[in-house]
Each structure stands twice: as structure tokens, then as C-alpha cells.
Amino acid sequence: MLKSGIAVAEQITATVKSEEHAGELAEQFNIRVLAGGNLAAVETADVVILAVKPSVMPAVLQEIRWSLRDGRILISLAAAFPIALIEHLTGRRMPVFRAMPNIPCVVGTGATGIAYNALATEEHKEFVSRIFSAIGVVCFVEEDLLHAVTALSGSGPAYIYMVIEALIAGGLKQGLSHEVSTRLAEQTVLGAAKLVKDTGLHPAILRDQVITPGGVTISAIHELEAHGLRSMLISAVETATEHSRTVTNKIMEKNQNTNE
Ligand SMILES: NC(=O)c1ccc[n+]([C@@H]2O[C@H](COP(=O)([O-])OP(=O)(O)OC[C@H]3O[C@@H](n4cnc5c(N)ncnc54)[C@H](OP(=O)(O)O)[C@@H]3O)[C@@H](O)[C@H]2O)c1
């Protein structure tokens, strides 16, 4: 929020659990940080961002519900925790957003999928988009598609780390040093992604441009096809999407008897 320029440090209050962490965060960001004190923090807030683990969400929502006001904005980062359950547990009519960022947001190159409820206006969407645009790209999706977002960009960095790791190992096997293998592998992934983004071309077209008939690249691509690289990644995203859906169903089952 500080980076996006939509708020200055004096306007932000964060809460954590431990006193020790509160002190660290206050020093790092020069903002007000409370250990506990969620109710007090929410009382005067126009925007409330929840970034606790999904298992902690019900308790925190019950705790702050009396301080929430209709019309203020609520943003949840809790993976797999549905908007309907947030609405149910708060009992408020307020714009609710669910954001699924990914780990490269720590270097400003994140990808965040965002869903929202019926009370969110274009103005609210613009505001929320500005927050997450400060740490990368933002895509608005239907809530059900957040499972696919989680599977693709949420978990995706883990898949790509495996690709980078394997490329480094490939270089090492062929005699490149650790240093050279690592530099070349990371830059190759970074550069290939940047070229897709900057040119707007389909990756298959860019891939074709690297292939010389009878050359080196096509012999490697034959190996990748023989081992089903593309099919494996498609299945990985499918399995992770299904798993995310299962997690949401479990959260719903667990909370279905929660009293308002
Ligand atoms: N990590 C990811 O890549 C990622 C991606 C997308 C979404 N998410 C979602 O983001 C959320 C946070 O994930 P995380 O990995 O950052 O979790 P985390 O490391 O466990 O951090 C949770 C934070 O919540 C604080 N906290 C816990 N209980 C609290 C309470 N009752 N009141 C106030 N603060 C409380 C903790 O305080 P202390 O520091 O004092 O313990 C901690 O700072 C989760 O819902 C997760 O699903 C994470």
C-alpha cells in the first residue's frame, strides 16, 4: 500500500500476534503495528486486509465483525477461503475481495488473481487493483476460477523453480560451473518470459523461431515431447486446481454450522 502511493505510513495500522514481530514490522515500515488489537485496528479503517492463515480466518472474522462497517472494503488473502463464508461470518454488506498473490511479489514481479462480490463497484476494483499493481500484474477473475489461479500462478513459481533447478543440473552435467549454470538458467527463464510478455507473441511462435531444421534445439524438443513436458504441466495445473477446490469444500464443511 505504501509502494502504490494510495496511503502514507500514518494511515496504516497492521496487526500481528507476537509483540516481537510487531516491533520488527513497525521499525521496518515505520507504521503503527499492534500485537493483537484487531478490533481496535478495524474500528477506524476504510480498508481491511486479512492476511492470516485460512484456519485462523473464522476466529479473526468473528473478532472484528462488530467493528466492520457496511460499505468499507474487505480484502482477504486467505487461500481457498470463499467470499460467501467471509460474508456469512461477518454478517456485513460490504465489498469483499479475495486476492491470490504469488511469491515473486516480494521482488515486485508478482501475479495476483482477484475475485470480488456483488457489492464491489468499478471504483473499488480500481482501488484494489492499484494496491496489488504495486507488486506485479493483476487479473480479475470469477471466484470459482481462483482455484485455477492458485494452481497456475500461486503454485507456479514452485514448478518453475524445478525447471531452473533441472537446467542448472543439465549444465553441470555437461561441465559448466555452478556459477555459470545458475546465471545462465535464471536469465534464460527470465528472458524467455520477458520476450513472451514484451512481444505479445504466442510462445509456440517464439519457440519455432529458435528452431533450425536438423539443429540442436529440435533434438532437445524431441526429448521434452517424448517425456511429456507440456502434458505434465497441464496435468499439474489440473491436479492443483482440483486440490484447491477440495480444500475450499473442507473449509465450507468445517464452518457450515458456525453461528452468525
Ligand atoms: N505465502 C504465500 O505464497 C501466499 C500466497 C497467497 C496467499 N497466501 C495467504 O496469505 C495468508 C498469510 O500467509 P503467510 O504465509 O504470510 O502466513 P504466516 O507466515 O503464518 O503469517 C500470518 C501472519 O498473521 C499473524 N497472525 C496470526 N494470527 C493472528 C491474529 N489472530 N491476529 C492478528 N494477526 C495474526 C501472524 O503474526 P505473528 O507474526 O506475530 O505470528 C503473522 O504475521 C494466508 O491466508 C495464505 O493462505 C499466502
Image (tube, rainbow, N blue to C red):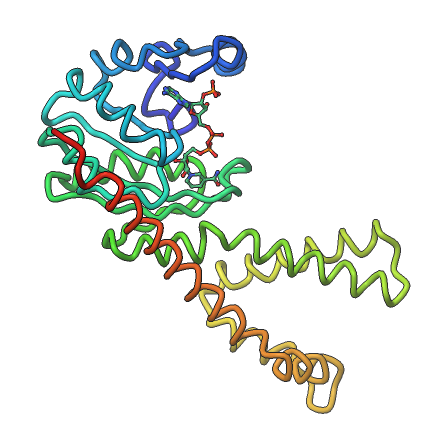
Residue appearing at x 24%, y 45% in the figure: 252
The residue located at (51%, 63%) in the rendering is: 196
Residue 64: x, y in percent?
22, 19
Instruction: Please tell me which residue is depicted at 69% across the width and 90% down the height of the picture.
Output: 213
In the image, taking residue 112 as reference, residue 42 lies left or right, namely: left
Is residue 122 shown above or below 183?
Answer: above
Q: Nearer the viewer, residue 203 or 66?
A: 66
Which residue is at the front of the view, 233 or 135? 233
Q: Nearer the viewer, residue 243 or 169?
A: 243
Image quadrant of residue 89?
top left
Which quadrant of the frame does ligand 1 lie within? Answer: top left
Give the quadrant of residue 54: top left
Residue 243 position, x and y percent, is 40, 57
User: Is 115 placed above or below 31 here?
Assistant: below
Q: Quadrant of the C terminus?
A: top left
Asked if residue 131 is positioned above or below residue 184 in the image, the reply reads above
Residue 15, position as x, y percentages in the image:
38, 16
Q: Is residue 101 above or below residue 127?
A: below
Nearer the observer, 224 or 210: 224
Q: Is residue 87 left or right of residue 154?
A: left
